[in-house]
Image (cartoon, grey):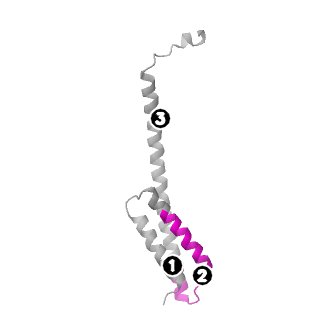
Amino acid sequence: MSTALVQALEELARESATVGAGPDPDTEVWKEYGRRREAIFLQLRAMKLPTAPAETERAARLMQDILRHDAAVMERIKAKIAGLREEFAELARMRRALNSYGRPPRAPLFDGCA
């Protein structure tokens, strides 16, 4: 029979696999997963460690799975942030271009004469 620690890790591993394998969820899904993950790890700190070798091995494998899924999620988040940065940079370029349409061109010869 699994200990509470192994059960909690199994639950978190299922959640991390779901978040990591699905399509890009919205920000709230990632935030909720982060809150849930933090709450479970806080619970884990207070739990008694398993003494049976099989349970210890199972807990270690689950933690490795969770960390692997978390790394994949972090890479997806980094890629999404990079994409958003590119979009913001493009929007800034477009804004500058649009703002320049309504102004007469600058004449460097007369810049200091005003």
Residue drawn at (48%, 50%), measured in percent from left and top? 81
Sort mark 3 into few (<14), some (14-19) or many (20+) by Cα contacts within 10 Å: few
Q: Secondary structure at mark 3?
A: helix
Which one is in front, 27 or 61? 27
**Relative to the observer, which residue lies in front, 18 or 27?**
27
Chain part drawn in magenta: 32-60
SS at mark 2?
loop
Q: CA distance from mark 3 to mark 1?
A: 46 Å
- Give the amino acid type for the residue marked by disc 3 in the picture: Ala
Q: Which residue matches tag 2? A: 47
Amino acid type of disc 2? Met
Residue under pointer 1: 8
For marks 2 and 3, the one nearer the N-term is 2
- The amino acid at mark 1 is Ala
Point out residue 73 in the picture as x, y percentages from the top left corner.
Answer: 47, 61
**Image height of 74 relative to 50, above or below:** above
The Cα–Cα distance between marks 2 and 3, rounded to whole angstroms, is 51 Å
How far is mark 2 from mark 1, CA to CA? 10 Å
Does the residue at mark 2 contact the one at mark 1 (Cβ under 8 Å)? yes
| Residue to which mark 3 is pinned | 92
Rendered image quadrant of residue 23: bottom left
Residue at figure coordinates x 43%, y 32% from the top left = 94
Is residue 56 positioned above or below 92 on the image?
below
Dot 3 or dot 1: first in sequence order is 1
Residue ID at (45%, 31%): 95
State the SS at label 1: helix
Give the percent coordinates (x, y) of residue 4.
Answer: 53, 84
Give coordinates of residue 38: x percent, y percent: 56, 68
**Mark count:** 3
